[in-house]
Image (cartoon, rainbow, N blue to C red):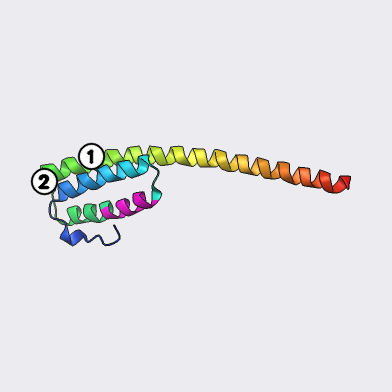
Amino acid sequence: MADFDVARVGDLSAALTTRASRLADAAAQRDWASVTALDAELNAIVRRCAADGEPTRDVHAALQAVARVYERAAATIGDAHGELATWLVGLAENRRAWIAYATIAEVGQ
């Protein structure tokens, strides 16, 4: 994905659809590196679509599909954020418990 060249993209609607599908899969698998790379590629393709002027029906439909994928990906990312926040709170609580235990152990010696 690092060697992506938007100028070499032929069929914009197919490129949008393919990458949107990959983005949905990457988000579902929580493959954040792929999500980031695919987001950059989609962004470049969308900028090219905008530069080309009024989109064809196929490109317009593909852009709408991309928007729906982004909505679902954002929800997945939000869920992952919430899970990470819960996990971090748990780590902080465990850390405080270990500090308290260590303090009690030191006082007891």
* Numbered tag placed on residue 56 in the rendering: 2
Distance (Cα) linking label 1 and label 2: 14 Å
Kindly identify the residue that appears in the image at 45 percent across and 37 percent down: 79
Q: Is residue 16 left or right of residue 76?
A: left
Above or below, 76 against 2 in this view is above
Secondary structure character of the magenta stretch overall: helix
Q: Is residue 36 magenta?
A: yes
Q: Is residue 109 left or right of residue 71?
A: right
Secondary element type, mark 1:
helix
Q: Quadrant of residue 37?
A: bottom left
Mark 1 vs mark 2, foreground winner is 1
* Numbered tag placed on residue 65 in the rendering: 1
Amino acid beneath label 2: Thr
Picture quarter with the N terminus: bottom left
Kindly identify the residue that appears in the image at 33 percent across and 39 percent down: 71
Frontmost residue, 40 versus 105: 105
Region in magenta:
33-41
Residue 101 in picture, x, y percent from top left: 77, 43
Amino acid beneath label 1: Ala
Q: Quadrant of residue 59?
A: top left
Q: Is residue 40 magenta?
A: yes
Mark 1 or mark 2, which has the lower sequence index?
2
Secondary element type, mark 2:
loop
